[in-house]
Image (cartoon, grey):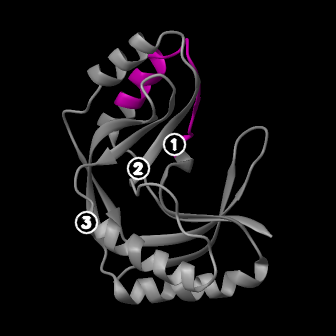
Amino acid sequence: MKRLFIATKIELEQPFLDLEQNLKRYLANDKIVWVEGKLQHITHRFLGQTPDAQIPKLKQILNNISHDFNAFNLEMNKLGVFGSRYAPSVIWLGFEEFGAYLSLFNDLEKQLLALGFDPNHGNVVPHITLGRVKETQSRKYFWEIIDKNQPQFSQQISIAEIILYQSRLQPTGPIYTPLYTVKLR
């Protein structure tokens, strides 16, 4: 059994790296686990604990996707938070328009369901996780910082490569190992 997910690796450009540093500085008194830059990605589908025997079938699904979809760009242009105003849980960067992403997600989901995976639960919101919020000193201050740091710039994120990753959780943070990579046409 391996803990798996399907994603595209990304790298933030300088304006977003600066935004991330500002958030870390302004929210330094809050308990937030920040994601290392080398681990940042857009998840297409979290699979969870998966039997090793499913990996060849997952590779075939990725091959199907690579033949069916052209590479596309997403315009990253917003800062968001999952959770509620009272209990924020994840700080993320996201996108206004993501129709091409939804098409890819829906095709991937259909093939995964046919393979016996449980359906994805919740809304589909493509995003890049910056940090996981464990505790805030002041919710009011936290939300002021989020509101004041909405980007006035954007970055094109290329979805040209899809990767099947293994995730191993360690006390020092997760380790992501690419198991299989395909390029979209």
The quadrant where residue 148 appears: top left
The answer to which quarter of the image holds residue 2 is: bottom right
Asked whether the viewer can see residue 119, the reply is: yes
State how far apart marks 1 and 2 are (Cα).
14 Å
- The label nearer to you, 3 versus 1, is 3
Residue 31 in the magenta stretch? The answer is yes
Q: Residues within 10 Å of mark 2 (few under 14, many from 20)?
A: many
The part of the chain drawn in magenta is 19-37
Q: Check residue 43 for magenta coloring.
A: no
Mark number, residue 99: 3
Counting labels gives 3
What percent of the width, then of the height, locates residue 75? 24, 53
Residue 183 in sight in this render: no
Viewer-proximal residue among 132 and 124: 124
Upstream in sequence: badge 3 or badge 1: 1
Helix, strand or loop at label 1? It is helix
Q: Residue at x 36, y 87 (%)?
A: 68
Which residue has dot 1 on it? Answer: 37
Q: Position of residue 67 (x, y in %)?
A: 39, 89
Q: Amino acid at mark 2?
A: His
Q: Earlier in the sequence, mark 1 or mark 2?
A: 1
Q: Are marks 2 and 3 in contact (CB under 8 Å)?
A: no
Q: Is 4 displayed left or right of 159 in the figure? A: right
Residue linked to disc 2: 127
